[in-house]
Amino acid sequence: GQQLNQSPQSMFIQEGEDVSMNCTSSSIFNTWLWYKQDPGEGPVLLIALYKAGELTSNGRLTAQFGITRKDSFLNISASIPSDVGIYFCAGRGSSNTGKLIFGQGTTLQVKP
Amino acid sequence: GAVVSQHPSRVICKSGTSVKIECRSLDFQATTMFWYRQFPKQSLMLMATSNEGSKATYEQGVEKDKFLINHASLTLSTLTVTSAHPEDSSFYICSAEGPRWGGELFFGEGSRLTVL
């Protein structure tokens, strides 16, 4: 079956630093989504990507859909304390059954 | 737009009782909703796909008689954990597919179930 590998598993950075995380798939995806989850809450959609090569920004966040359609990255610029949380990538494959496959998550901690 | 609401956010119940969790799409119609389970510090595990007006599709290893799903309308899906036991304690999250087919999933706030 399709699998997603997300890295790094965790990051501990200084406020103001930039952050980068990525996901790779064993097969081609048609949709890449990036979510943030705060403790005790559901994931919140940050960025959605639908085309290979697509680069999309949402404030300080930028994500790209890899050309090979097997990877995606999320960058956060000038991190702030409220960026703390778990970031998940998710992808939907070519079968388009509607099911999303989730990465393992990247836990981000920001030191003021 | 695309708001999904879950209720209750927290529930504590005794072993052997049943618990119902509701998932509503507030400002759009959702023919398909998804139920996930999340263990501490882990990713989301898909339990089942809920289709309006038809039976839910369960993922391998998920007991359909334990986790009853009903999707009676385009804005409401319910998950009932029957005869709950402590090992059913978890964070349950629902999601609904937005208006764009094949696009984003929007998640509810999650429901923390604790079975004593």
Image (spheres, coloured by chain):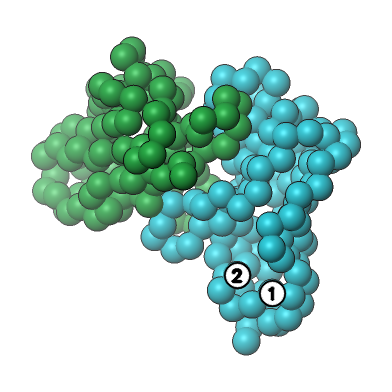
Chain colours: A cyan, B green
Q: Quadrant of residue B101?
A: top right
| Left or right relative to A67: residue A31 | left
The residues bearing labels 1 and 2 have C-alpha atoms spaced at a distance of 6 Å
Labels 1 and 2 touching (C-beta < 8 A): yes
Q: Where is residue B12 in the image (x, y as percent from the top left)?
A: 17, 54
Specify the subunit that label 1 lies on: A
- State the image coordinates of residue B48 (x, y, percent, origin top left): 41, 27
Residue type at mark 2?
Asp
Residue A46 shows in the view:
yes
B7 sits left or right of B13 in the view: right
In this picture, residue B68 sits left or right of residue A18: left
**Can you tell which mark lies on residue B42?**
none
Q: Do tags 1 and 2 sit on the same chain?
A: yes
- Which residue is depicted at the point 38% across and 39% down? B27
Say which mark, if any, is on residue A79.
1
At label 1, the amino acid type is Ser
What residue sits 39% from the left and 43% below the top?
B4
Label of residue A83 in the image: 2
Nearer to me, B85 or A53? A53
Q: How crowded is mark 2: few (under 14 residues within 10 Å), some or many (20 or more)?
A: some
Residue B93 horizontal/vertical position (percent): 39, 44
* Chain letter of the residue beneath label 2 in the structure image: A
**B57 to A84, vertically: above or below:** above
The picture quadrant where one finds residue B72 is top left
Residue at left offset 14%, top offset 44%? B15
